Structures are given as C-alpha cells and as structure tokens.
Image: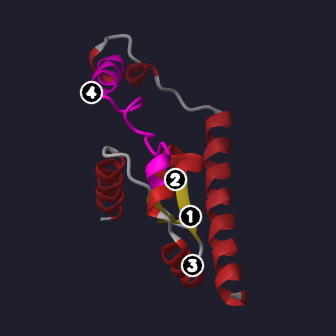
Amino acid sequence: MLRVLEKALAWLVVNFQLPNKPIITYAFSPQRSHLDILAKRAILYRGPKELEQILVEFDPSWALEQDWDCYSAIFSPRKVMEKFKEVFLKPDSPQHLIKFNLMDHAMVQSRRLQKKHRHFSKKIYLYFS
C-alpha cells in the first residue's frame, strides 16, 4: 500500500511540474523520491505553522518568474525509454548482473539510519514548535 501511495504522489508531483508550477511539500515525508528530484526547487514546510506562513505569504507573480521544471529533462519519453531498454531489454543489462556486496549492505543500513534521523528530527521539531 505504501508503494502505491508513493507512486501516486510521484505522479501528482509530475503533473504539477509539467505546467511549471511550484510544489509545496512536507520536508519530513517518508516518500523521498519527489524531494530528491525537486531538490532546491521544492518549497518545503516542516509543520502547520510553516505551511500557513508559506500560503499566506505566497506571491504568485514571483512564482511565475521562476523555473520550477525538474522533471522534463530527466523523465522525457526518450530518456525513460532509453533507460527501460538499458535495464530490461539488453541481454547484458545491469539487471542481469546485479550482485550485492558488503558495500551495498552498508549503503542500505546508511539509508535506514538517515530515515531514522529524519523521523527523530520531525518528532523534535513538532515537540518544540
């Protein structure tokens, strides 16, 4: 279910990004892919007070002057099909050669630790705000 929610969120973000609209999103979201892609172009909030401040102080004329597009270069039909072909259709694709080593396991543990850190930061922020 969580994976479906993450994919739905990604499509929602893409649909807003295509017409070059700003994305206001939760900084502590457990679904991270859209945050990684949006990077500095995301307008992040960490709690209800910050969201209210962003919405009250939002300047549409400023937003129209910005370039919000993060997706079209990475996820154009050509790029997506090239990646699909590379990963799934070539006989010597990385999908057929994947082997996990100690470094891969260390990276997984590192990601888990980052996730726990974000969760703890969220709790601290919400407790003291």
Indicate the position of residue 90 as horizontal and vertical percent values: 31, 12
Foreground: disc 4 or disc 3: 3
| Crowd around label 1: few <14 · some 14–19 · many ≥20 (10 Å) | some
Counting residues from the start of the chain, the first of labels 1 and 3 encountered is 1
Secondary structure of residue under mark 1:
strand
Q: Is residue 27 found left or right of 82 in the rendered image?
A: right
Q: Which circle's residue, 2 or 1, is located before the other in the chain?
A: 2
Placement of the C terminus among the 4 image quadrants: bottom right
Q: Nearer the viewer, mark 2 or mark 1?
A: 1
Q: Are marks 2 and 1 in contact (CB under 8 Å)?
A: yes
As drawn, the label of residue 35 is 2
Circle nearer the N terminus (4, 3): 3
Decide if residue 115 is on the left or right side of residue 31. right
Which mark is first along the chain, 2 or 4? 2
Q: Is residue 67 magenta?
A: yes
Residue tagged 1: 44
In the image, 58: left or right of 72? right
**Circle 3 residue:** 53
Q: Position of residue 34 (x, y in %)?
A: 45, 51
- First in sequence: mark 2 vs mark 3: 2
Name the amino acid type tagged 3: Gln
The magenta stretch spans residue 6: no
Stretch in magenta:
63-86
Q: Quadrant of residue 87?
A: top left
Amino acid type at image mark 1? Leu
